[in-house]
Image: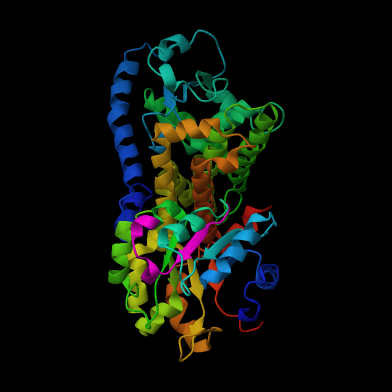
Amino acid sequence: MTDHRGDWPRLVSEALEVSSFAVELSALSERELPSLIDFLADGTWLPFRYISVHAPSKGMSLPEPDLTRLLAELPAWIDAIVVHPDVIEDPENYVKLGRRLTIENMDRRKEDGCDAEQLRPYFEALPEAGLCFDIAHAASIDSTMSGGAEILDSFTSRLRHVHLSSLDGESHHVPLTRKDTDRFSPLLDRCRDVPWILEAPPPHA
Amino acid sequence: MREASASGALERLAERAGEEFSNLQAARNLAAADQPKLEKRLERLEHDPGSSVVLFGSWARRELTEHSDDDWLILVEGEPRDDVSPSIEEVTTILGRDERKPGEQEVFGIHAFCDDIAEKVGLDRDDNTNLTHRVLLMLESVPFTGHDAHRRCWERILDGYLKEVRRDERPPRFFLNDVVRYWRTICVDFVGKQREADEKWGIRNAKLRASRKVLFAGGLLPILQCFRFNRDGMREFLVDQLTAPATDRLAYAFLEWEVFDPGARFFDAYDRWIGLLNDEEIRTELKAVTPENADESAAFREVQRIGRDLERGLLALLFDTDLEPISRQYGIF
């Protein structure tokens, strides 16, 4: 799907081929955000039961208060707005996102927001924020998955949705491998009630 | 290991999840503190033998807030008759005063007779009011006076449902159908009221998404779980379950079927709902919500979110556990 970045109708159409249950519209680069805002504002009906927007985490140039204002103005029917903790400069700017704010645990390339202890200050500062549990990120920090279990133990009531994929050697999201399916199963079992967002095409696609 | 009893299950789940569910706990504490005061006053009223003042709704679910209605009935054993003590006027001097008036005055705040409730089941004789009395009596009622009379009527209805059970290890389908019928009836009646330009659309919609859903699920889950018992065991199980608040029954099910995390999230959502109900500004905002302006209300959006969170937890419990074959087989047809 990375080939069609910014072509929101096409991305939605491709997502629908996988499932009409949940979708995450990712404006990972800040320059993608204006077109996503326009797309969401034009009244196109999206049939998903759960719609998440991934806030920018790259190419950031807007002052944080301006960026979070744009995010807060996303249509009310957006269920979650995923934010990487390492881009948060001042948590106060994110308070206005309310319960839609969803903080994602980070992978091994990041220095913050990777485990339960590092996530805790963000949730303390933003008590309404939810958790987006990226299970592949958790595995990259602790391959035994104890670190992932600790994240769920600590913040299970906050869990809003799961990011599901495997990671390649360069920490890129790739389809779930057989080995990871087995390794992730016990933790995914604890997340069976929340939407799972596939961050790479399913193996059969 | 099988969970021992429904009573106390919410506390056990909270402990397991490391959560407090502080709004729910406060609501339970308030109900426990206020009930004896009202019981004392009601007991001073003259009571005919076989009569009982029964509370429903928040009182019975142990979800009392400062803004809860007093949904009450004078339940009377035997056939319908006039001049029953206590009278409606007498009870009205104690219950439902000021803002605590019963939510649906044509259903509550009246005498109701056990013969009607237990025997007029199905067909035209079983009108909405009778159905409501019967199902609420089973699923969320608590006697403030006349405990024995309430219990006798309650067991009579339960035994009436179980009399139709022909085989062990099957959910009691007659009881199940009556509970499902009640839930679908209140959902349909919601739209009926909406068509009559309902002034309370917002708060009714919110309650349907949260409290009423919990009431329904709190009846559905115990009934479905009966597949594990013979007829005698089924009765014992249902007595244990249905004499506990609906939230305990649901916590029991989340524990019993080992879906602890979804259970924690379910009750986190329900705890938020109780918090909203206790907030006067939020209640005022919800009362002003109409189908036309619903999207503009932050409070209503939060209620929608809570409703979805509750639904996801329940669906995981019903369809992503070993309950799934029973839910599938009995939940639709």
Q: In which quarter of the image is the N terminus of chain A?
A: bottom right
**In this figure, which colouring scheme has been used for the structure?**
rainbow
The location of residue B323, given as percent across then percent down, is 53, 61
Magenta-drawn stretch contains A39: no
Residue B84: in sight, yes or no? yes
Magenta-drawn stretch contains A78: yes
Q: Residue at the spot x=52%, y=80% of the render?
A: A165
The location of residue B133, given as percent across then percent down, is 55, 29
Residue A26: in sight, yes or no? no
In the depicted structure, whether residue A15 falls above or below residue B277: below
Residue at far bottom of view: A169
The one nearer the camera, A44 or B32, is: A44
The location of residue B258, given as percent across then percent down, is 42, 64
Q: Residue at the spot x=39%, y=53% of the render?
A: A95
Q: Residue at the spot x=35%, y=63% of the render?
A: A155
Quarter of the image where one finds residue A146: bottom left
- The span picked out in magenta is A77-93
In the depicted structure, whether residue B7 falls above or below residue A82: above
Q: Quadrant of the C terminus of chain A?
A: bottom right
The location of residue B231, given as percent across then percent down, is 52, 50
The one nearer the camera, B6 or A177, is: A177
Residue at far top of view: B83
Q: Judge left or right: residue B75 versus residue B116.
A: left
Q: How many labels does the image show?
A: 0
In the depicted structure, whether residue B229 falls above or below residue A113: above
